[in-house]
Amino acid sequence: YEVKTVTTKPHPGQKPGTSGLRKKVKVFQQEHYTENFVQAILSAMPGGAEGKTLVVGGDGRFFSPEAVQIILRLSAGNGIKKIILGKDSILSTPAVSALIRQLKTDGGILLTASHNPGGPENDFGIKFNTDNGGPAPEEVTNRIYKISEGIKEYKQMDLPDLDISKVGEFTHGPLAVSIIDPVTEYIKLLKEIFDFDMIKAWLHETSPKPTVLFDALNGVTGPYGRAIFVEELGLDESSIQNCVPMPDFGGSHPDPNLTYAHDLVARVDKEKIQFGAASDGDGDRNMIYGYHAFVTPSDSVAIIADWAEKAIPYFKKGGVKGLARSMPTSGAIDLVAKEKGLEVFEVPTGWKFFGNLMDAGRLSICGEESFGTGSDHIREKDGVWAVVAWMSILAAANKEKAGQGINDVLMAHWNKYGRSFFSRYDYEECESEGAEKMMSHLRDTFASSGFVGKSLKATTSSTSFTVKEADDFSYTDPIDGSVSKNQGLYIKFEDGSRIIFRLSGTGSSGATVRLYVEKYSKDASEYGHDAQDGLKPLIEVALATSKLQEFTGRDKPDVIT
Ligand code: VG1
Ligand code: CO
């Protein structure tokens, strides 16, 4: 085979968002589109592509097999030495991160649009991770974008399609390709982190036995879920569902929240299941939901941090070095950090900002309000890890006192730290123009004289909030000093409440407006309340201040989490 230089011209807009490039499948199917972006990645890789080893895999969504063959042809053309590929192109996002680290490869290419729907009419995505196992930092993604905007040619070898359905070592043109089982190494890693015997004891020796349900939402975590719940923990087949990955996720939206994980919610409610959990398309998100017990992601990461050294051997051994959350995530974890005397960091939305802190040994556990939780065992958020962490907490709690469920753990946490009420409203696929105008209106409002100190009144009650600070979030990375600006508009009030507005960076069309609200309470009589009730005045203030309805034409959100 020979290296062939193919003439191309730029496809504008190949700008990686919060987590890689996500577009409609039809966009990726355009002539040279995928090739251009893959070439941009290979050209932008730190140290170049020559002689390098990459992990390749993803959530198995529609167009993944075609993308894999393109990556193989361009890798061969660009001098890559070795590709480690998940069988049938399947590897969860956390599994890719783990493999990059374990096998010390030079990075990886992930084929996923995460929780976005899949299939010929829906989304595809490509993301590059660097050799620490984490999403490429902005410096690299900016370089990828810049190359894609000026691309004139790409290099490939006209290799025939490789059969990716068999595990083994293959030679493909000049490439060594190792096709691996997606699950084996990842399960080994989890078994090093957690005490599976303790979890088993809780599951099998408690009477009555706790009931469990894991839902992979037809995404990539199906095989991982089966390996953990059925094979390792010895639970019945009925404790897992939707565990065969499908290219279109069965036509549903593989996002683990109360709206999209409706199958799980329905069965948990009907069968009064004590521990339910779900993960997203690519396996980095999680939701913990038991009968009458929902854990918000902001609380989840705080509780995991609180229990870590008691319930999880990885942290018992290595200790907890520091904690972190994304800016919109509630401050629940800050309170745990304070109590334990740990550093806590507030970073912009998107997992890539946690990596430097972890690499520097200053961060162990972190999370995002968007159902993302993880630790420094890898450099991605990890849905299955979070689910096993929660089973560990329940097992440990039951060792202290029998009969503890999710709600008991939650209540105990709030009684110790107070409760941060938190909610996010998503207005999906708005007209970009209206959404941008709303954001500039907010910027203007923040800049207007007298806004700080002003009292903003709720519309249907007498509650009001005094503005303490209002700005566009900017982050200076404490490790490398890089600055990320315009990361979300926030208002902080005198009583500690917050309102935040952001435009999503993961959508494939239009603009999604995200509104986040947070209110802290130390009044125990409020802990049992519904978050929506307690947050109502704040939401009213947010809607009035932003004139959201006027600018976007939306009178209610598509999803509330
Ligand atoms: C969303 C979430 C963010 C998360 C990102 C990737 O981004 O808000 O917290 O890191 O998705 O998650 P945005 O820009 O749409 O708000 V995943 O599971 O899609 O990789
Ligand atoms: Co995801």
Image (cartoon, rainbow, N blue to C red):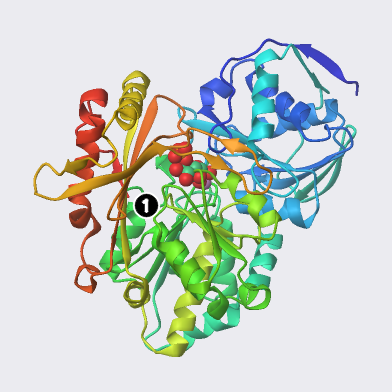
Q: Residue at x 35, y 28 (%)?
A: 443
Q: Position of residue 348 (x, y in %)?
A: 51, 43
In the rendered view, tell whether residue 298 sits above or below residue 559. Answer: below
Q: Position of residue 166 (x, y in %)?
A: 74, 48
Mark 1 Cα-neighbour bin, 10 Å: few <14, some 14–19, many ≥20: many
In the rendered view, tell whether residue 1 sits above or below residue 370. Answer: above
Q: Is residue 149 visible?
A: yes
Q: Pick the quarter of the image with the N terminus.
A: top right
Q: Position of residue 484 (x, y in %)?
A: 56, 36
Horizontal side, residue 145 vs residue 273: left or right: right
Q: Is residue 181 visible?
A: no
The amino acid sitting under disc 1 is: Asn
Horizontal side, residue 11 vs residue 485: left or right: right
Disc 1: which residue: 257
Q: Residue at x 25, y 40 (%)?
A: 542
Q: Position of residue 300 (x, y in %)?
A: 43, 63
Q: Residue 295 appears in which quarter of the rendering?
A: bottom left
Q: How many numbered dots are placed on residues in this image? A: 1
Of 503 and 191, which appears nearest the observer? 503
Of 300 and 447, which appears nearest the observer? 447
Q: Residue at x 52, y 33 (%)?
A: 485
In the rendered view, tell whether residue 318 sits above or below residue 463. Answer: below
